[in-house]
Image (spheres, rainbow, N blue to C red):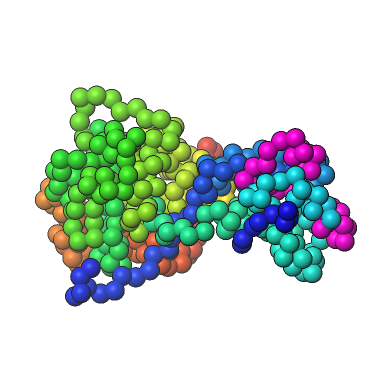
Amino acid sequence: MSLLSGTGGKAAEEPALDVASGARLIPRITIQAFCEHSQTAQLVESAVHDRRMSKVALTTHNGGLEGAVETYRSNPTPNLILVETSLPTDEIPGALARLAEVCDAATRLIVLGHANDVLLYRELIRSGVSEYIVLPASAHTIVSAITELFAAEGAAPIGRTIGFIAAKGGAGSSTVAHNVAWAISQHLRQDTLILDLDFPFGTAGLNFNQDPPHGIADAIGNSQKMDQTMLDRLMSKAANHVSLLTAPAMLDRSFDFEEREFEQIVELSQKSTPVVILDLPHEWTAWVRYTIATIDEIVIVAEPDLANLRNAKNLSDTIKALRPTESEPLLVVNKVGVPRRPEIAPGEFATSVECRLLGQIGFDAATFGTAANNGQMIAEVAASNKANEVFRLIGMHVTGRTAPERAAVRAAGLKLPFLKKKRA
């Protein structure tokens, strides 16, 4: 037996600009790691928190390479084995040959070693080892290596997922989400799908002046037989490059969902649409928490007052803990400049929340009210409104087209007792 068989529109329209792809999710595989040191075991276990690993079943064991050999003499091998070894470089190939004798040919192997030796690396790769990672390493390095093995093989491009959530009810998260989706569709010429996940009170249909017969509730209700064709039939076209899965916006029943209820819908959406916007409700449930942990970007929309600041800080801290290896949440401060209302300066707000400030949107009751009542986007009502440029810049950033601006959040943070920094 060889060691282990591993492998590393319309014609008149402007061309669509590239959008950064979403993360490749690793399929449902089993991984077993055999570590010699507790620090290595902790490192491997921390990799499970990466959202790309959400479907993976991972277990860690002691004993290193020799422990793996003994285990698989009487047990079947998983899809992937990670083994740590401190053996001298000239002894590693022989030890791996003994492991190969007790492994299935389809099993992949990643070796975690302590020798930074190019000749050893080349020999191991030639013999069939999938990857050799020199310790110490990061969890991100390990996850990326696994992704290259299992998610990148013939994988179709995956759409980028961006979730918008309000720090407080009425902050305007849905309005921002819909206008950003519009900006992406018009400026990047990319197909964009809005998933309105606020089942009882969603406004995507209203904001785009749509009343489709089907929507997100039908997709969830038919999840057992859902496929790409059915999902496409349930979508409604709101504008050029913009499609919707609208919320039912009815109170005839309650909407209680399992933690992974929306996982299939999001994944199917990613396979057909370059940009998927998730309009998340202002609530905290198991499915909201899980969805936030598994998408590419999170944008918190808040008004510049104390209650929004407290909630945005709680959201920011929780999202960072849920996504330790992923991008941090982003912040949009909305309704800035309400007459006679005391406000927290957007820069101070962002610094206190410890989020990057993507943009601030001025209060404009007339324009935003007219757009809402007409079922139109701000750009359709007032093309020269400054908010349109903010929506465009947000859209460019969350789709990976521009680098974030750090200067916008350099103001000193507010000194509030309940906002002490929780993260080291």
For this orientation, the residue located farthest to the top is: 253
Is residue 83 highlighted in magenta? yes
- Residue 51 screen position, x and y as percent: 52, 46
- Residue 192 screen position, x and y as percent: 29, 57
- Residue 87 screen position, x and y as percent: 86, 54
Q: Taking 153 as reference, is 41 above or below it?
A: above
Res. 309 image quadrant: top left
Q: Measuring 41% from the left and 41% from the top, which residue is drawn there?
A: 263
For this orientation, the residue located farthest to the front is: 1
Q: Measuring 25% from the left and 36% from the top, which residue is drawn there?
A: 218
In the image, taking residue 23 as reference, residue 33 lies left or right, namely right
In the image, taking residue 341 as reference, residue 322 lies left or right, namely right
In the image, taking residue 108 as reference, residue 91 lies left or right, namely right
Q: Taking 175 as reference, is 379 above or below it?
A: below
Res. 249 image quadrant: top left
Is residue 373 highlighted in magenta? no
Residue 204 in sight from this viewpoint: no
Q: What number of labels is visible?
A: 0
In the image, taking residue 228 as reference, residue 142 lies left or right, namely right
* Image: magenta residue range: 68-93
Q: Measuring 67% from the left and 46% from the top, which residue is drawn there?
A: 104
- Residue 29 screen position, x and y as percent: 57, 43
The residue closer to the viewer here, 111 or 187, is 111
Residue 156 in sight from this viewpoint: yes
The residue closer to the viewer here, 116 or 387, is 116
Q: Measuring 28% from the left and 67% from the top, which residue is drawn there?
A: 189
